[in-house]
Image (cartoon, grey):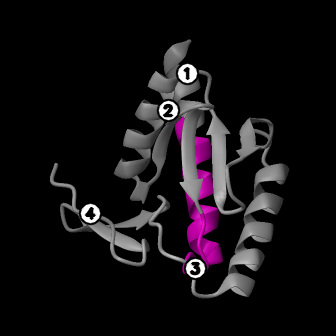
């Protein structure tokens, strides 16, 4: 599978002609800090209301960074790969073990909601496969 680099604003990339929504760190300053705060509050409300993600959520090194703890690094790499098949780019994380995602003002509420649904599905798939 050919993988292209994230777009300059970190928003969209393409893998095999399909759009990918990128939630990785870009080192680009967010152009709309107030909108970013709204997106962060929206995401945190969804995370806290989700029975699968809520207990796994850990705030990252900055307000935009979010960790979903998955038990071990291998599971994080598997989850990141699986999320790519759903069209979402996140980073595997070693400490804490799991996945790391960065939110930005250019992510719509629908994209954030879809990402969190996809993460929930992937976690359930991985838990089922591990049994």
The answer for how far apart the CA atoms under marks 1 and 4 are is: 26 Å
- Whole-percent x, y for residue 28 in the image: 48, 74
User: How far from the left and from the top, in percent, is residue 36?
Assistant: 68, 78
Residue 76's tag is: 2
Asked if residue 70 is positioned above or below residue 121 in the image, the reply reads above
> Residue tagged by mark 1?
72
Mark 4 against mark 3, which lies toward the viewer?
3
Q: Residue at x 58, y 23 (%)?
A: 127
| 108 w.r.t. 31: above or below | above
User: Where does label 3 land, which residue?
Assistant: 30
Residue 21: percent from left, percent from top: 43, 66
Question: Which label is found at residue 5?
Answer: 4
Q: Residues within 10 Å of mark 4 (few under 14, many from 20)?
A: few
First of labels 4, 3 by sequence position: 4
Quarter of the C terminus within the rendering: top right
Image quadrant in which you'd find residue 109:
bottom right
């Amino acid at each position: 599978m050919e993988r292209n680099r994230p777009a300059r604003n970190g928003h969209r990339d393409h893998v095999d002609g399909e759009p990918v929504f990128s939630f990785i760190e870009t080192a680009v300053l967010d152009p709309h800090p107030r909108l970013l705060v709204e997106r962060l509050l929206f995401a945190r409300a969804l995370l806290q209301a989700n029975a699968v993600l809520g207990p796994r959520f850990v705030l990252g090194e900055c307000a935009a960074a979010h960790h979903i703890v998955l038990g071990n690094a291998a599971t994080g790499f598997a989850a990141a790969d699986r999320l790519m098949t759903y069209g979402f780019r996140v980073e595997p994380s070693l400490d804490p073990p799991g996945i790391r995602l960065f939110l930005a003002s250019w992510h719509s509420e629908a994209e954030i909601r879809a990402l969190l649904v996809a993460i929930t599905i992937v976690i359930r798939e991985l838990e089922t496969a591990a049994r």
